[in-house]
């Protein structure tokens, strides 16, 4: 056995025995059979433990006080597989051109960081694929370890648009481990280590914020070099927020469009107009430019890392589609215009 093979074997021996895989990813990787209306172009994996996450986010089926199914995250099921089989399936899917990125979602539990590092190193040694990680790295040292281990991009979720909502939904009020100020500190540290545009955060529209509050936080993230990825709140049975409603599609479209303008430096939050209820009423872009951007369909695609399309993470295939996993067709562009009050 040569040295490299020995190193690979050693890494495989340290890997966690099991891992969760999103249902769509499992089908693309040949681990399960099934038909997909839109195939994921990123393989979504999630660290496994026998039990729930130690955090207690009100929207999450994995929260420690949630009574939701243990195989759920948002509205997607994540069956468990032996890690070695998953790594083999991932390698084949990458070679075949079906998968262009792998994203590892990390729960909170005592051994999670060692599990995460082992997974990243194993995948990096065996497969030529870009690796994203969505986790709570806790400190600067862990950020550096992830970067040196082969992680190309990192996501550190804010989820809520304001500190008050953050505390209420995932922070001190629900006895969660997260602190608003510390999340921003970690995001800034991550930008120093990974670089601008290589750090993302999740923002969930529909947790009780106004459009103004969400768009202000989007601008704040962009200003520090962080890419905000939008999600629509999805009520899941068994979670603390199971009785809450999804945001209106009209609200989501306005926030999506504002995010696109801000991320692409076409407009800024400070110049946009809002009514007395915090509803966005002026994008600060001339109508001709705005229509051209809308007709491209780009603002309404899944936002996040390159090649991340997260099919039906927030919605049923029957719609409404909050985030489109593929290019919009003409009738969908017309529908978006109508949702924005422009048709």
Image: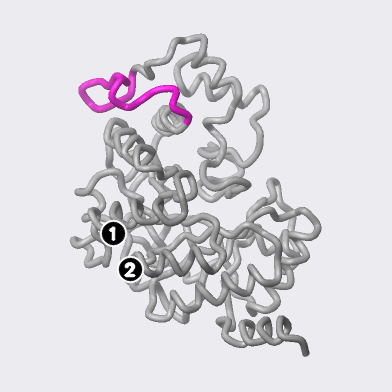
Pointer 2 local density, CA inside 10 Å: few below 14, some 14–19, many at least 20 = many
* Pointer 1 residue: 170
Instruction: Give, as a single range, the part of the protein colored magenta.
Output: 264-281
Up-down relation of residue 275 to residue 193 (above or below): above
SS label for mark 2: loop
Residue 248: within the magenta? no
Q: Is label 2 in contact with label 1 (beta carbons under 8 Å)?
A: yes
Report which quarter residue 61 is drawn in: bottom left
- Front residue (pair 133, 320): 133
Of mark 2 and mark 1, the one earlier in the sequence is: 2
Q: Position of residue 196 (x, y in %)?
A: 45, 45
* Pointer 2 residue: 55
Q: Position of residue 320 (x, y in %)?
A: 53, 37
Q: Position of residue 41 (x, y in %)?
A: 67, 51
Question: Disc 2 versus disc 1: distance between alpha carbons?
Answer: 8 Å
- The residue that appears at 47% across and 78% down in the rendered structure is 114
Residue 277: within the magenta? yes
Is residue 67 left or right of 183 when viewed as pictured? Answer: right
- The colouring scheme, among rainbow, by chain, secondary structure or one colour, is one colour
Report which quarter residue 103 is drawn in: bottom right
- Front residue (pair 112, 319): 112
Up-down relation of residue 76 to residue 67 (above or below): above
């Amino acid at each position: 056995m040569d040295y490299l093979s020995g190193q690979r074997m050693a890494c495989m021996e340290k890997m966690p025995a099991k891992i969760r895989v999103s249902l769509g990813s499992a089908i693309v990787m040949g681990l399960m059979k099934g038909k997909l209306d839109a195939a994921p172009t990123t393989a979504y994996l999630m660290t496994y433990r026998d039990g729930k996450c130690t955090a207690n986010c009100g929207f999450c089926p994995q929260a420690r006080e949630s009574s939701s199914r243990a195989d759920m995250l948002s509205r997607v099921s994540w069956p468990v597989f032996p890690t070695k089989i998953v790594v083999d399936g991932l390698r084949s899917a990458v070679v075949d051109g079906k998968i262009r990125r792998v994203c590892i979602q990390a729960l909170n539990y005592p051994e999670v960081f060692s599990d995460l590092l082992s997974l990243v190193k194993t995948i990096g040694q065996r497969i030529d694929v870009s690796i994203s990680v969505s986790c709570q790295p806790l400190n600067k040292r862990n950020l550096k370890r992830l970067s040196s281990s082969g992680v190309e991009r990192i996501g550190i979720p804010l989820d809520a648009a304001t500190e008050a909502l953050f505390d209420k939904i995932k922070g001190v009020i629900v006895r969660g481990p997260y602190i608003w100020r510390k999340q921003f500190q970690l995001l800034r540290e991550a930008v120093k280590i990974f670089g601008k545009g290589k750090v993302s955060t999740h923002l969930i529209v529909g947790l009780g914020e106004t459009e103004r509050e969400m768009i202000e936080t989007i601008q704040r993230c962009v200003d520090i070099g962080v890419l905000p990825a939008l999600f629509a709140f999805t009520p899941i049975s068994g979670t603390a927020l199971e009785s809450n409603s999804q945001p209106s599609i009209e609200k989501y479209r306005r926030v999506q469009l504002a995010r696109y303008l801000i991320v692409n430096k076409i407009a800024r939050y400070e110049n946009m107009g809002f009514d007395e209820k915090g509803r966005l009423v002026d994008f600060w872009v001339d109508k001709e430019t705005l229509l051209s951007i809308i007709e491209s369909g780009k603002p309404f695609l899944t936002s996040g890392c390159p090649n991340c399309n997260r099919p039906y993470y927030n919605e049923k295939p029957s719609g409404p589609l909050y985030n489109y996993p593929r290019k919009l067709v003409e009738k969908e562009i017309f529908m978006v215009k109508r949702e924005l009050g422009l048709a």
